[in-house]
Image (cartoon, rainbow, N blue to C red):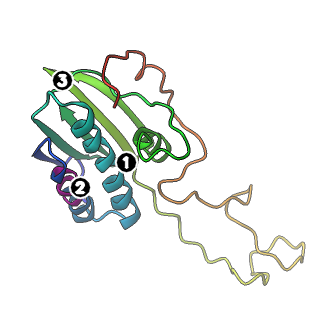
Amino acid sequence: MVPNDVQTFSYPSVSESVSDARKAVRKVVSDWGLASELAETAELLTSELVTNVILHAQDSATCRVICELSAKSITVTVIDHGRGVPKMRSSSDTATNGRGLFLVDALAHDWGTRPVLRGKATYFVLEIPTPAPDTDETVTGEPDERSTGNNTGLTHSTDPRGLRPVPTGLRPWRRTPRTHYHSATHDARC
């Protein structure tokens, strides 16, 4: 993993580009030596953003996908030259589309849209999980040498609340407010 690495790809705004962008982002994240779960999430969310460009930014002939690595996160940005700003919309339980931004919102640490010259950039941020510290605790339920003397037969977690880390891509809360990203809406329904 080399922090501050940036990889850029350009694609025509055609349906075949979704698959090409997915493969490129997955390869980049894998080449950075990050967990396969992170690569899968980045691949999925990239396909949602590129699909939005193809479906809703018809006046954009191309889109650009930028993958950026920092010490703590990866950011994938999709730039198009279409009008409008993506916004989440409600969809019925039987709808076959319209859930892309809900996936982005659910799986990304952060996401948003910002204006660029003749268009917009829609991005998502995925945190790189920090490795859990190695412990010598027994998982079998037998007391270990560091037991506090309560002789219950259970080992103690290093977390005083007994919580385990949340798997990559799943988080129970949002750390940053989103209201400032979605304040402007235009005529596009991405």
For mark 3, what is the residue? 119
Q: Main secondary structure of the magenta part?
A: helix
- Check disc 2 and report the residue beneath it: 25
Gap between marks 3 and 1 measured at Cα: 28 Å
How many marks overall?
Answer: 3
Query: Badge 1: few (under 14), some or many (20 or more) residues near its Cα, within 10 Å?
Result: few
Determine the secondary structure under disc 1. loop
- In this view, 26 is above or below 108: below
Q: Residue at x 22, y 64 (%)?
A: 31
Q: Is residue 156 magenta?
A: no
Q: Which mark is residue 72?
A: 1
Q: Which residues are magenta?
A: 17-23
Instruction: Indicate the amino acid at tag 1.
Output: Lys
Q: Is residue 15 left or right of residue 135?
A: left
Q: Are marks 1 and 2 in contact (CB under 8 Å)?
A: no
In primary-sequence order, the first of circles 2 and 3 is 2
In the rendered image, residue 43, in percent from the top left (x then y), is placed at: 31, 56
- Asked whether disc 3 touches disc 1, contact meaning CB atoms under 8 Å apart, the reply is no
